[in-house]
Image (cartoon, grey):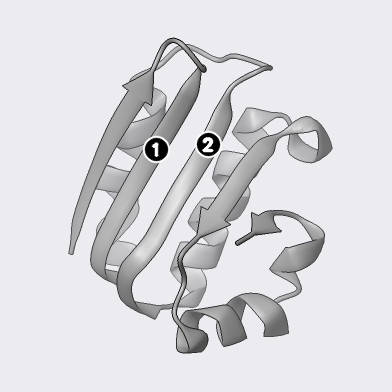
Amino acid sequence: MTVSSDYSSATDTLTIRIVGEFDYDSHQAFKDAYMALPLSTRRKYVIDLRKVNYMCSAALGMLLILRERAGDDASRIFLQGANKDVLKILDVSRFDQLFTIN
């Protein structure tokens, strides 16, 4: 598992890319990726899941913590590029109600 991030100040967008298994072992790296920036109510978060081959409930919890930090319903968090297995986990968990999934 690797987690990397890029921030665009022009659009106030933080993109977090996860490669491999998105599980409890990803916790600190995922948290570090978004905690490095000060809070912003306008920030857009893009979670790039294209290279995630496994996601567990701990990862779902991490996404919920990010959502809370970003402002709950007012947050702008986009989950992008998930494969069919990860999409199924997000669907069963009803994350389409909480996040924008592309």
Does 90 sit above or below residue 38? below
Q: Earlier in the sequence, mark 2 or mark 1?
A: 1
Considering the image in quadrants, where does the C terminus appear? bottom right
Is residue 23 something one can see in this rendering?
Answer: no
- Relative to 94, does residue 69 appear above or below in the rendering? above
Q: In the figure, is residue 81 to the left or right of 99?
A: left
x, y percentage for residue 88? Answer: 59, 87
Q: Secondary structure at mark 1?
A: strand
x, y percent for residue 71: 72, 29
Distance between mark 2 and mark 1 Cα atoms? 6 Å
Disc 2 packing (10 Å; few <14; some 14–19; many ≥20): many
Residue 48: image quadrant is bottom left
Give the residue at mark 1: 15
Residue 31 x/y as whole percent = 37, 40
Looking at this view, is 60 or 40 the one in front? 40
Check if mark 2's residue and mark 1's residue have beta carbons within 8 Å: yes
| Residue type indicated by callout 1 | Thr
Label 2, secondary structure: give it: strand
Left of 21 or right of it: where is 70? right
Q: Residue furthest left?
A: 2
* Residue hosting label 2: 45
Where's residue 96, x and y in %? 75, 66
Q: Is 72 situated above or below 83?
A: above
Q: Is residue 35 visible?
A: yes
**Mark 1 Cα within 10 Å, few/some/many (few <14, many 20+)?**
many
